[in-house]
Image: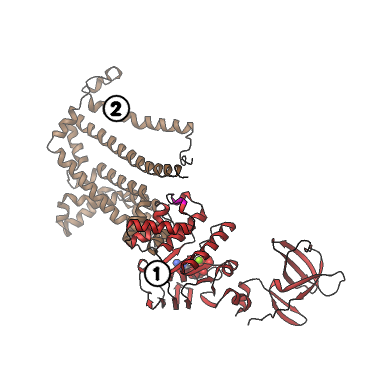
Chain colours: A red, B brown
Amino acid sequence: MSQSKDMFFESVTKTFGATVALENFSLTVRSGELLTLLGPSGCGKTTALRIAAGFDRPDAGRILVGAIDITNQPAHRRQMGMVFQSYSLFPHLSVIDNVTFGLRMQRVAPNERRGRGLRMLELVRMDGLTDRLPHQLSGGQQQRVALARALATQPDVLLLDEPLSALDAKVRAEVRSEIRALTTRLGTTTIFVTHDQEEALGISDRICVMNRGIVEQVGSPIEIYDHPKSSFVAGFVGELNRIRLGGVDLVVRPEQVILNNCHTADTGGEIVATSFHGSFMRYQVRLDDGQAVTAIAKHTPGSGMRAGTRVTVKIGDEKNERPD
Amino acid sequence: MATVISRSKTPLWAWVVITLAAIFFILPMLAMARFAFQRVPVALLGRNTLFDRWTLDGLVDMFRDPDFRPALWLSLRISVLTVALTLLVMLPTALWVNVQAPRLRSMVETATLLPYVVPPIALVVGAGGAFRNLAPWFLRSDYCLVPFYAVLAMPFTFRSLDTGLRSIDLKTLIEASRSLGAPMPTTLLRIVVPNITSALSGTIFLTITVVLGEFTIASLLLKPTLPLYMSYSQGRNPQGALGLAVLLLALTTLLFFAATRLRRRGAERYTIRIGAMP
Ligand SMILES: Nc1ncnc2c1ncn2[C@@H]1O[C@H](COP(=O)(O)OP(=O)(O)OP(=O)(O)O)[C@@H](O)[C@H]1O
Ligand SMILES: [Mg+2]
């Protein structure tokens, strides 16, 4: 539908006073993909998006869309759709007028404008509430309309800055999958910002893990999870146990730790805490030598173990790469 | 149906307060009105003469006075220009403070309080002296009052605009609009202004009030504005002058309520639309 383009950050640097928000930040966002910027608070994700949108100017480096350098283009000339963390619908305009605002700026004729706006609203399942004002919508509905508004002009790139963070868990999951379905369907190049690693793993074609303004690793969710290039990535994406067993240092994901009930008091440890998560159980185990290990086990009826149970601890067969 | 959105029940004590306040403000106005519109000697204005000899003669005489109309027009022109100048200067200032430099807010706020600290007489003597040497033509023009009045209104206008801008998520709204392809002027006109209409009408209203009520500066600079005319004509035609004062009061009050009503009507229209939704 929209003809998407690759987008490039080329050695972008941005400082705020003494704070280096982005340092020599280079990244390619491929046409049609959903790329997530993932990293701890303050690592520069929002700064990268704002520079892409044209709200901030980089100190050095370039931004390109396709072959065109847009570094010095003002925000309103760029073809960027943006959805913000806070609710950003225009309070005085109805849902449909919000969605068609961008088309109006492009001087699209009123009839076509309305038609295209309604189609976008259908795509986010908001076509029943076209005449409402923003304050009459729930948070999830507002963000869906904001998404429709950002996509209505068929932007080169869609920029999403933690658009789900104000929503509660269930609505969050719902809108998240809607974003994924919609951008796939429209083939829109998308940059999604989050500091929630689970969200990043679930939604992305590729993830760019950032730390202190620097790209740590770019790759598919599976690559990032299974083959983290640095201990920062390994620690930030997914959970990690660092333990020493039999004189060997190991880095293991909780799901690779296998616990078995044992009654003899041989090698192993004791479950100190459990928590139930529906499809799986989490166990906190204290080994006899004092080390702490987290394990995750699939839940089947009758399989749960209680705190205080003595267990043997084995590490699963899969190869565990030790980053760094 | 979701038609009741903002109308909550007003408690009794609120009505009592409102009534007392109304009496406090309306009684003197009624007294003024009787003096202005009854051809009865002041000493005889009592309960038993309540319905005697009401007349608009005083006011009509005043309207016929050849000096009246020019004074009215001058004040109206100055009002319009002062409103324009105020919006031109204070709106960008308030925007700048809210978007770019929230840390400078308290400084700007203090600066806008200047007219409270500097008495009008000092303002005129100071600024007047400077202009008399630099640009004598400026003080000769009747419109030289415009910047003075804009400054006088500043404490009200800045606060009104600033409050309006603070009540919306200004930065995000501007950025959302810009990312949708609207250049800054369009963004201000189509997105910012419609969301601060009450602050804007407040600003306009307060500015006009200042212009229609200012006496000192106009008199020092010898400009024949409406307040000056009213003050001078008090000797010649006291009934007419007071009648005009009553009229002005009533008019501004009406305007004020009209502005409030219009806004509420807008809100209700939206509400009814939802009520009709499936
Ligand atoms: N306008 C600004 N003025 C000063 N410092 C800023 C400004 N904007 C960002 N910074 C700083 O730049 C760094 C990166 O900020 P940024 O907002 O990009 O982080 P983020 O990754 O989006 O974090 P979060 O997940 O908390 O939103 C932070 O240290 C922040 O304090
Ligand atoms: Mg951020």
**Residue at image mark 1:** A54
Looking at the image, the residue that sits furthest to the left is: B66
In the displayed structure, B25 sits above or below A253; it is above
Which residue has dot 2 on it? B31
Q: Is residue B22 magenta?
A: no
Say which residue appears at 44% left-offset and 77% top-offset.
A8
Residue B201's place in the image compared with A148, above or below, is above
Q: Is residue A265 visible?
A: yes
Query: What residue occupies the far right of the structure in this picture?
Result: A264
Depth check: give the residue in front, A83 or B229. Answer: A83
Quarter in which the C terminus of chain A is drawn: bottom right
Q: Viewer-nearest of labels 2 and 1?
A: 1
Which amino acid type is marked by label 1? Gly
Which image quarter is the N terminus of chain A in? bottom left
Mark 1 surroundings: few (<14), some (14-19) or many (≥20) residues within 10 A: many
For ligand 1, tell me if the residue under mark 1 lies within 8 Å.
no
Magenta-drawn segment: A128-134
Question: Same chain, marks 2 and 1?
Answer: no
Depth check: give the residue in front, B266 or B217: B266
